[in-house]
Amino acid sequence: MADTRIPTDDELKQRLTDLQYQVTQNAGTERAFSGVYHDTKEPGVYHCIVCDEELFSSEAKYDSGSGWPSFTEALDPAKVSLHEDRSLGMVRTEATCANCGAHLGHVFPDGPRPTGDRFCMNSASLDLKPGETPSGT
């Protein structure tokens, strides 16, 4: 279950690694193939590292070859907010946690069926809970 209280900036600086803080709070990006989950195949549920919201199921994870954990869809579309991102001279779709606003990564329209989407997420913004099934299932 998600933490209903969003941690303060000071709490996040104490609890998160520098990379986790940079990614989630400053829309940073970890280097390709460097994240702990980029090639993980373990079943479970991926939660937001900031607020513990359930975001993605391992059943929606696939190997995109991009170097980041990729998913075809979120557990619930309402759990991930999508925003236009015009940074770095590109137009992309940024994905953030709908509960706490943490930056997760970007969504691209080049994924496999059935959705055609590739939720390209940073490992640093996620916490895999192995063996867990999504609540409500």
Image (cartoon, helix red, strand yellow):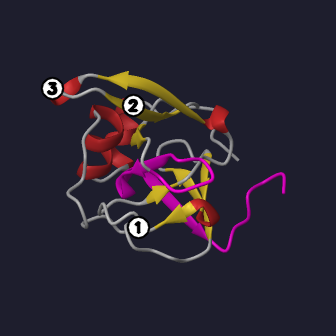
Instruction: Name the residue: 49% across, 59% down.
Output: 127
Residue assigned mark 1: 37
Name the kind of residue labelled 2 in the image.
Thr
CA distance for labels 1 and 2 = 21 Å
Name the kind of residue labelled 3 in the image.
Gly
Instruction: Name the residue: 59% across, 32% down.
Output: 5
Residue assigned mark 3: 89
- Which image quadrant for residue 80? top right
Instruction: Name the residue: 44% across, 57% down.
Output: 70
* Residue 130 belongs to the span the image colors magenta: yes
Q: Nearer the viewer, residue 14 or 84?
A: 84
Classify mark 3: helix, strand or loop: helix
Instruction: Name the residue: 56% across, 30% down.
Output: 98
**What range is drawn magenta here?**
111-137
* Residue 10 belongs to the span the image colors magenta: no
Please state the total of marks drawn on the protein image. Answer: 3
Name the kind of residue labelled 1 in the image.
Tyr
Q: Nearer the viewer, residue 22 or 63?
A: 63
User: Residue 6: percent from the left, percent from the top?
Assistant: 53, 32
Q: Earlier in the sequence, mark 3 or mark 1?
A: 1
Residue assigned mark 2: 93
